[in-house]
Image: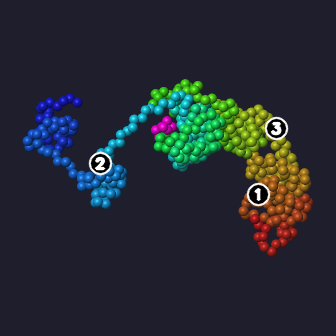
Amino acid sequence: MSRLTEEQQEKIRKIFKQTASIHQTSRKTKHSRKAVRNALGVIKSIPNAPQIAPRKSKLDPYKAKISHLVKEKKLSAVRVLDDIRELGYPGGYSILKEYVRRIRPKTAKIPRPPIDHPPGEEGQMDWSPHKVTMGGRELVVHTGSIVLCYSRYIVTHHFTDETLPSVIRLHEKAFAEVGAVPEKITYDNMTTVGRHIGPGKVWINQTFKRFAEGYGFEIVILQPGKKERHGKVERPFRYIEDNFLNGREFADLEDLNNRADYWRAHTANVRNHGTTRERPVDRLAREKSLLKPLPWDKSDKFYKEVDRLVQVDFCVAVDKRKYSVSPDLIGQYVKVRLFRDHLEIWTEEKTDCRHVYAEDEHSRQVLPEHEKIYKTITGQRQLLKDAFLRLGKAAEDYYEGLKRTRKSAAGYHLQRILKYADRHGADVVSGALAHAARYDAYSANSVLRIIQGRKIKSSSKKHNYKPIPDNVRDWLRTCDVEEDKPGHFDQLINKNNPSPDKDSGDE
């Protein structure tokens, strides 16, 4: 800003004498208020110059009391407001807060040397809750994070809790992704890991201690109040919230974690870090040789496990890709273990199969042995269907009902019903099929209960089913059930099983 000439300063003085306002003088002279004040500073001794009276404040009568409460009692502005309102203070909180801020003694900041983290030495772990939109609802997830202090490489995972299994799972994920372990990992006080219980005394969770010993890293529980010591892991939580979570919606927790992993790989760990001015992945490449290698017996055991339903195409879906399983598992839930370079499908604590990851989305990967089994089963199903339909017209209708209600499990019921035909006779089973169909009872168990003269459970509430007497099986064997009127069978039951209570046999 250029210096004002004597002529400009004189003009400012003249207008100020007329207006007695710095603001009006500034507007009329088109100079800044700072320039006007500087020009007026040389005329303080000029006779007749207008004097600006200090503006009165509602705080004025109470300033002595406020000063005592702030400087001597060390009260907050909120507490001061309560006290001076009892004395009649009519003003608000904002001007009081600003005044307290000006008069409060400034505490001297203790200089702290920067914390040096040699490569490979330390990682930090912590939790942070975040609100996310998931499945159309706002929910709270718990973000677990591990940061390698030298490289600033970050590994995160979102959970529904902060339990010990979640802590262990986060560590396993970090070790698997990095392929190594730091010398030590630091933690704030947390029951799942450890906490300070007295001067110089630290309690460590024994389960987590055994886990740490298995991977060879040291557990360090930081002293309470040492937040600056844990800044490497705490500061990125705001970065995660602002740059990843905010403004996004997620289908479920799996979707959230899949997209979080992609974001870390393509954004967080490949950005130029604000402090190091380098990409975390580049610093990790230099740091990795100084980290501890994974224990030989742990290197192949890092996996994420999810439950999946085996669909009718004898495949499970993982990340928009399908992988085959044994066709006899159709309709069952299996465990899918996701390793770094492959996945395994487990059922009843046994491995069913192993797949390498498919590259293309929406692809279907079928193992040759599964294709062979499926072709064999498909041929067997046709033979099974043909044998079942030979039971007669009642079997044809019942077969359609089984396909409609039991879907992929229909073959199981066909096998059982054919065994009943071998044991009790085709005519008995045919009659039982016709009667079960009247009550929408499509299952092998319903057919067996009819043959045994027991009640069946109907899928339709409109049916009132009566218990079957012992001699009904003989009637099933000798009568063409499908040609009888629907009431004929019930009349026979009522005749052979009289009851004083009309509804005594209803379900």
The residue lying furthest to the bottom in this view is 500
The residue lying furthest to the front in this view is 199
Q: Amino acid at mark 2?
A: Tyr
Q: Residue at x 20, y 42 (%)?
A: 23
Q: Amino acid at mark 1?
A: Asp
Q: Which residue is mark 1?
A: 440
The residues colored magenta run 227-233
Nearest-to-viewer mark from 3 and 2? 2
- Answer whether labels 3 and 2 touch (C-beta < 8 Å): no
Q: Quadrant of the N terminus?
A: top left
Element carrying mark 3 = helix
- Please say if 40 is above or below 395: above
Give the x, y percent position of residue 498: 84, 72
Q: Which residue is mark 3?
A: 376
Q: Residue at x 55, y 38 (%)?
A: 220
| Alpha-carbon span between mark 1 and mark 2 | 81 Å
The label shown at residue 192 is none
Element carrying mark 2 = helix
The mark nearer the N terminus, 1 or 3, is 3
